[in-house]
Image (tube, rainbow, N blue to C red):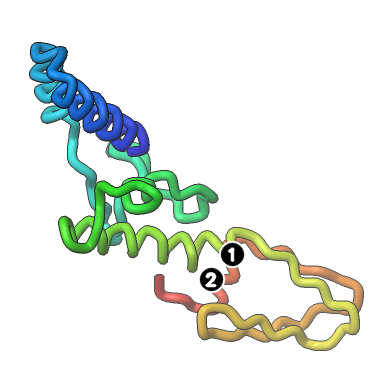
Amino acid sequence: MIWRLFIILMHTNLVDACNRLKIEEDGVKRWQKIFSEIPSYQINDDGALKEWMHPDFRDNYHHRHQSHIYPLSPGFEINKETDARLFEACRVAVEKRRIIGKLQQTVIISHGGNPCTVHYAGKSVTLNIQKGKSVTMDGELIETLNLKL
């Protein structure tokens, strides 16, 4: 999706400059036609802005970047006033990354051998870990806490 924003920025700035300078009239018409054929942003089944437009690629909320949100911030293309639906889809995408992606992996170490209570997203789970041992959790913490995301 990031390529779409670059095209929009380039198109907007290029067309604006050419119109102000009164040059490249044929080029502006050609670029505007190309621009009109760029696919719109898409929203996935979760209500989040899709990271990938190709149907074979599913969104990965554990992915560390949020470049598909660039049109919202620091970009200017999506905002609450001009497109509330896409704005909400961006909010959902960020929230899912915040909740799901944050605990992609965690290591819990018991120094004293006492039960360890993990608090996350308003839920808690107590783990019994032997003294000096550790537990590595990949995504199973979300299942253990029974989070509905």
Where in the figure is residue 11, as x and y percent of width and height?
A: 23, 28
What is the quadrant of the C terminus in the image?
bottom left
Vertical comparison of 141 with 39: above or below: below
Q: Which amino acid type is marked by label 2?
A: Ile
Taking depth in this image into account, of 96 and 141 the one nearest to the observer is: 96
Q: In the rendered view, does 135 fall on the left or right side of 104?
A: right
Residue 17 visible, this orientation: yes
What residue is pinned by disc 2? 142
Q: What element carries label 1?
A: helix
Instruction: Give the number of marks.
Output: 2
Q: What element carries label 2?
A: helix
Vertical comparison of 14 with 79: above or below: above
Taking depth in this image into account, of 20 and 131 the one nearest to the observer is: 20
Where in the figure is residue 68, as x and y percent of width and height?
A: 37, 45
Where in the figure is residue 9, as x and y percent of width and height?
A: 29, 34
What residue is pinned by disc 1? 103
Determine crowd level at label 1: few under 14, some 14-19, many 20+ residues with C-alpha closer than 10 A.
some
Where in the figure is residue 75, as x and y percent of width and height?
A: 34, 47
Which of pointers 2 and 1 indicates the residue nearer the eye?
Answer: 1
Taking depth in this image into account, of 146 and 48 the one nearest to the observer is: 48
Residue 50 visible, this orientation: no
Residue at 41% of width from left, 75% of height from top?
148
Mark 2 vs mark 1: which is more N-terminal? 1
**Contact (Cβ within 8 Å) of mark 2 with mark 1:** yes
